[in-house]
Image: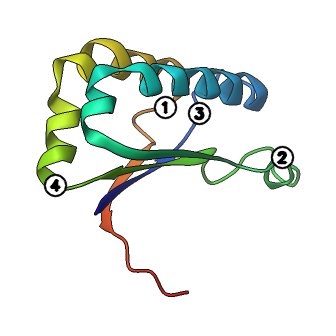
Amino acid sequence: MIKVIVAIKKKPELSVTDFQTHWRNHAELVRSNAASKRYIRKYIQCHTLPTEYESSGEAAYDGTAELWFDSLEDKDAFFSDPDYIRDIQPDESRFADMSATRFFVTQEHSIM
């Protein structure tokens, strides 16, 4: 199983609340997309806690997304699928600062 972890920075002009609201709505785009149904096995959003913004007003990242795929080929197929490119990808740049967002392709090793 392959997991893509995305460390997301919000667009600077968005408040934390506006970012989180948009991102939660974005989940429905992912859930209902034909490419997602073909390739994604699991999708999780992890939103940064409000307490992380209290000291400096900013967090290292505003959240992480986790996407599970059966293989590297399925991951590549998803991110190049016309349904993803047309429906999901344009919305990502509406709430995420893509120049500061980082993608990690991993293989999970369960410890406990």
- Judged left or right of residue 58, residue 82 is left
Q: Earlier in the sequence, mark 2 or mark 4?
A: 2
Residue located beneath label 4 in the image: 72
Q: Secondary structure at mark 2?
A: helix
Q: Earlier in the sequence, mark 1 or mark 3?
A: 3
Residue located beneath label 2 in the image: 50
Residue in front for this viewpoint, 46 or 12: 46
- Label 3 is placed on what type of residue? Lys
Please name the residue shown 46% across and 27% down the image.
Answer: 31
Q: Secondary structure at mark 1?
A: loop
Please name the residue shown 74% across and 32% down the image.
Answer: 16
Residue located beneath label 3 in the image: 10
Q: Secondary structure at mark 3?
A: loop
Q: Give the CA separation, mark 1 to mark 3.
A: 5 Å
Would you say residue 12 is visible in this rendering? Answer: no
- Where residue 20 sits, quadrant-wise, is top right
Q: Earlier in the sequence, mark 2 or mark 3?
A: 3
Q: Give the CA separation, mark 3 to mark 4.
A: 27 Å
Foreground mark, 4 or 1, reads 4
Foreground mark, 3 or 4, reads 4
Q: Give the CA separation, mark 2 to mark 4.
A: 34 Å
Quadrant for the C terminus, please.
Answer: bottom right
